[in-house]
């Protein structure tokens, strides 16, 4: 620690203001050197409320000290410095990549939510149609052979289901109980067919999950 050259107490306030992380505090005419670090200092950040020990606890370091003898005791002038917080280095490219990844993930999540909402609406629409027109012959979950002859709807994939309804509409399928099914098939457009299929698929998936 180096000793300060001659300095007047009037310059203390200037130095304290000049640097936010540097301040000076002083004590005049102190009698006992052994207690100087426990006595409240004047000036600077100390303002008569903080001792050297208090300043150290607050993160200040003693950078310089000037000690002069007077007829009435000893004058102490302390220069305190506080280390400026280090600014973390930001990798802008990495940060940008991370932000883009989060945005992309959020976009995927939003798309997935919309898909589930659409699926739920289609399933509900299919449920209404199925319960009003189909359930009596095909069973609660599409598990029955209508009139004992047709394939259970739950065992069909979407393409098979679409082809079956199309054939009923076109009259391509006219065997067995086709005449019973045709009026209902004529009431169904492509969206109705998909919605009924989604509904049957959803309730059978729930049934399988319940078994696990």
Image: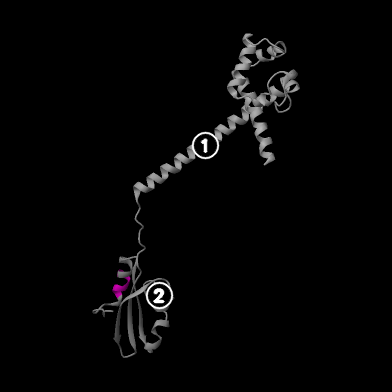
Quadrant location of residue 128?
top right
Dominant secondary structure of the residues highlighted in magenta in the image = helix
Q: Quadrant of residue 14?
A: bottom left
Residue 20 in the image: state x and y as whole percent. Answer: 34, 65
Whether residue 120 appears in this view of the structure is: yes
The image shows residue 118, relative to residue 150, as above or below, that is below
The N terminus sits in image quarter: bottom left
Q: Which residue is mark 1?
A: 110
Kindly give the residue lying farthest to the bottom in the view shown.
71
* Image-quadrant location for residue 169: top right
Where, quadrant-wise, is the C terminus in this rendering?
Answer: top right
Dot 1, crowdedness within 10 Å: few (<14), some or many (≥20)? few
Residue 13 falls within the magenta-colored stretch = yes
Task: From this view, report whether residue 102 is shown above or below residue 46.
Answer: above
Judging from the image, what secondary structure is the residue with disc 1 in?
A: helix
**Tag 2 secondary structure:** helix
Q: Which residues are magenta?
A: 10-14
As drawn, 44 above or below 143: below
Please name the residue shown 33% across and 84% down the image.
Answer: 75
Q: Is residue 147 left or right of residue 186?
A: right
Q: CA distance from mark 2 to mark 1?
A: 53 Å
Q: Is residue 189 visible?
A: no
Question: Where residue 31 appears, x then y in whole percent?
Answer: 37, 89
Between 120 and 78, the one lying in front of the other is 120
Check disc 2 and report the residue beneath it: 56
Q: Nearer the viewer, mark 2 or mark 1?
A: 1
Residue 132 has which mark? none
Depicted 211 relative to depicted 190: above or below: below
Which numbered disc, 2 or 1, marks the residue that appears first in the sequence? Answer: 2
Residue 176 place in picture, x, y as percent = 71, 12
């Amino acid at each position: 620690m180096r000793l300060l050259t001659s300095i007047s107490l009037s310059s203390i306030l200037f130095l304290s203001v000049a640097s936010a992380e540097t301040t000076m505090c002083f004590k005049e005419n102190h009698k006992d050197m052994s207690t100087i670090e426990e006595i409240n200092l004047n000036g600077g950040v100390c303002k008569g409320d903080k001792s050297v020990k208090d300043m150290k606890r607050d993160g200040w370091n003693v950078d310089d000290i000037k000690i002069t003898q007077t007829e009435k005791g000893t004058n102490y002038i302390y220069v305190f410095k506080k280390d400026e917080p280090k600014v973390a280095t930001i990798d802008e490219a990495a940060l940008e990549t991370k932000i883009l990844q989060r945005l992309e993930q959020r976009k995927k999540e939003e798309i997935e939510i919309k898909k589930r909402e659409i699926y739920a609406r289609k399933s509900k629409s299919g449920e209404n149609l199925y319960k009003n027109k189909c359930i009596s012959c095909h069973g609660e979950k599409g598990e029955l052979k209508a009139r004992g002859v047709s394939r259970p709807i739950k065992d069909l994939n979407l393409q098979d289901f679409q082809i079956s309804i199309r054939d009923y509409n076109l009259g391509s399928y006219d065997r067995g109980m086709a005449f019973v099914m045709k009026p209902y098939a004529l009431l169904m457009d492509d969206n109705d067919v998909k919605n009924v299929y989604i509904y049957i698929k959803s309730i059978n998936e729930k049934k399988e999950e319940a078994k696990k």
